[in-house]
Each structure stands twice: as structure tokens, then as C-alpha cells.
Amino acid sequence: MRERVDFYLRTDRLALRRFTETEADADLLYDLHNDPEVMRYLNGGKPVPREVITGETLPRFAAGGFYAAFDGETFIGWFLLNGPAEGPELGYRLHKAAWGKGYATEGSLALIDRAFSLGARRVYAETMTVNRGSRRVMEKCGLRFVRTFFQDWPDVIDGSDQGEVEYEITREEWEALRS
């Protein structure tokens, strides 16, 4: 008998559910977080030890705000909508096989809509300046460039010298796009 899964959100192609602290979810994250191309703009593509996934990442994800994303039965990655209710952060990380298929945009649009329906005044997202793919998703979702900023990271990765960028969309901008 299959375990019943409560989905947080559904779109035309995606189902998002909360993470659980199970071995199955640890396996999903381990595979995703150990793809050098997926992790290129996050840690320079270095492997993430399983102990970090099970001891740090998965408990943080299961605590809330992170959603495992599925296209049918296939895990394609995760989405984030987390932070203060009036201004949560949007994020996503997808398997390479899911890149370029509109999943990041589709899931992000659904989460932005959810945030505003729950009373948010703004939604923001951040990425490395050189991460053109992620920036393109933010722009497709109606987010606009706010600023470039620099952080001190323990490990320098390719492109970090160009800083990070922040994008946002306000409730008023979202409503104007939807009308």
C-alpha cells in the first residue's frame, strides 16, 4: 500500500510537498546536491557529504519552507518559500534534466502567488551575478533587479568576484501583472 502524501501545492505539471526526515528524502537530496553542475554557483561544484545532508540539510528542509518538487513520480528538485510572512525568500534547485523545461518558472510563479495570497507584501530572490539561468527565471516571474551586493564566503568560487544580485516583486507589481 502506498503512503499517502499531502501536497503543499500543485501546478499543471508539478506537485510540491514538504520534506521529511526520511532516508528516501535524504537520498533525493544527496543525488541533487552532489551534481557538480547543479552546485556550481553554490559551492563551486564540490560534493556534499551524506552526513551533511542527513545531519544539517534535511533537518533544516523538513523544518519548513522547502518543498520537494515532482513531475509525476520523478523528483526534479526543490523550491523554497521561507522567511517572514510579509517578505519571504523564493529559491529553487533543479536536476539538470529539468533545466530549460519551464519547471523553475512554473513552480516559482505558484509559490509567489501563494505568498501574496497569504499576505506577503514582497517576495525576493538572490543568486550569483553570473548565474544567468536563475536570473532569467526571476525575470520571467516578474521579479525586478534590486541590487548587487558582496558577501564574504569561506570558499571563493568562480564568478563570486562579481557578487550576488537581489530581485524582488511587490504585491502591487504582482497584481498589475495578473490583471
Image (tube, rainbow, N blue to C red):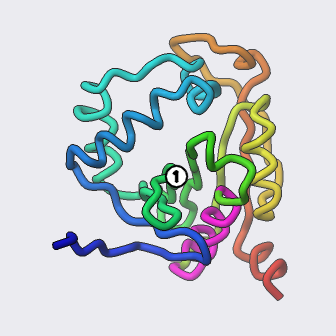
Please give the name of the residue rendered at 60% of the width and 64% of the height, measured from the top-left corner: 107
Q: Nearer the viewer, residue 175 or 23?
A: 23
Residue at position x 35%, y 62% from top? Answer: 18
Rendered residue at 52%/55% (across/down): 79
Residue at image mark 1:
76
In the picture provided, is 96 more to the left or to the right than 133? left
Task: Residue 24: give x, y in percent of width and height.
Answer: 26, 48
Relative placement, left or right, of 143 versus 79 is: right
Name the secondary structure under disc 1.
strand
Residue 96 lies in what quarter of the image?
A: top right
Q: Is residue 108 magenta?
A: yes
Q: Position of residue 134 (x, y in %)?
A: 72, 44
Q: Amino acid at mark 1?
A: Ile
Q: Residue at x 29, y 41 (%)?
A: 26
Q: Nearer the viewer, residue 175 or 136?
A: 136
Q: Main secondary structure of the magenta part?
A: helix
Q: Quadrant of residue 23?
A: top left
**102, above or below 112, in the image:** above
User: Which region of the structure is painted magenta?
Assistant: 104-118
- Residue 5 is left or right of residue 113, and the answer is left
